[in-house]
Image (tube, helix red, strand yellow):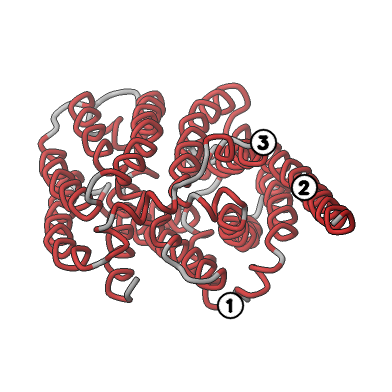
Amino acid sequence: MTKVEKGFIYSCLLFTFISEMLLSPFYPQLFSDYFQVNGVQATSLFIICCRLIVIVMTPIWAEAAKRWNFQKMITSALIVMAGCKLFIPMAETFLQFLVISLVLLFFQSSMYLLYPAMVASSQSDGDKVKTTTTYLFVFHGSVILSGIAGSFVINQLFPLDSYYIFALIDLILAIVSYFVLSTSNVFTKKEEFQKKESVSKGVKWQWAFIAYLLIVFLFYTGHHTIRPYFTVYLDSIYTISQQGLSLLYVMPSLVAIVLQFLLPKRYLQSRVKVLLISVTGITGGLLFVQVFVEPVWLFIFVRIIYGLCFFVSLAAIDIFFFQMGIGKKSPLSYSLVTSVQNTALLFSPIAALTMFQQNGGEGPFLLSGFLLIGAALCTALLSISLYKASLNQIKRGVEHSENL
């Protein structure tokens, strides 16, 4: 895959993420002030419906990519996405906003296949690590940009008008995709996907993959349960402006941007399991700490350390997948991982709402801490099991050679 093709994919992902996350930290305020509904309940309903669409559609798009022309699929999706973003500012009720957003996500789910397809085109494990960390750099960059921009957009008289800009960007990307992706063998030849996806159902659903999916569920639920009411919680204990709340919300992403240039990628590649276990457990403990710290400067410091561990664990959990057998033989099976991630994102607002109602703003932090510690323990057990399985395989190979 050429640098131009990779640049196009990163641009697609960047603007997709920004448009999706622009107002997400302020959904409770947006729904309450703009649509005159209960912001807390509407936020949970909106997130649940959106995640359901992504959970269902991402594996379907992955199957479609094996049979259809991937370039045409991406180009068509970008055009429809642009149309939906033109209609979003016209929504006058919460229900209209919800319906248009669901149609948008129906097609936007196809964009999530660009990342695993790009990793699959990498020639070596080192290139896969570089692609993964660059993807996370783009993702966290979009979190920062959307968080900062969202704090200003939410104060405008018509905050949804910002989607007109993203509609224009999607149209430009659709035109560019026609010229950039049409010359790429990775995207135009469906045989490439079929060849790489030629893995039996028995392998796809082996126990290790199922265990990995459980880890992904605990991991993403743990990190996202604190998000829906993060700004609401901070607003209740600190006197901070909306810009300050946005800055604290995106603090882990700011740290991730800096760490992208300092992280020793070779070390990450060779120590991925140990790092994933340790930093995931540490982030769980740091979430407990964030509940009990009182000075705002100390909260910021803990938030920075949390961001360091968060970025390393995000990179490690993806690299772990692409180093496993299922990730090497069937990279587009990452669509199943994406569905589990979105299942976690579906469950997390429900869990957050329950914990928020029963235990106040501290509740989501406590639950997230327990879930991340659980993810670390499950990763340790899976790593031990994989190590024992590899030893048994080597032992059987030696015995077979001795018999010969």
Between discs 1 and 2, the one toward the N terminus: 1
Q: CA distance from mark 1 to mark 3?
A: 35 Å
> Hey, which quadrant is residue 243 in on the image?
bottom left
**Callout 3 secondary element:** helix
Task: Please state if 14 lies on the left or on the right of 254 as rendered.
Answer: left
Identity, as a three-letter code, of the amino acid under mark 2: Ala
**Callout 2 secondary element:** helix
Residue bearing the label numbered 3: 207
**Mark 3 crowdedness (10 Å alpha carbons): few <14, some 14-19, many ≥20:** few
From this view, report whether residue 281 is shown above or below residue 218: below
> Hey, which quadrant is residue 402 in on the image?
bottom right
Residue bearing the label numbered 1: 262
Picture coordinates of residue 277, whole percent (x, y): 73, 53
**Mark 1 crowdedness (10 Å alpha carbons): few <14, some 14-19, many ≥20:** few
Closest to the observer, 41 or 180: 180
Residue bearing the label numbered 2: 380
> What residue is rendered at 25% in x and 48% in y?
155
**Mark 2 crowdedness (10 Å alpha carbons): few <14, some 14-19, many ≥20:** some
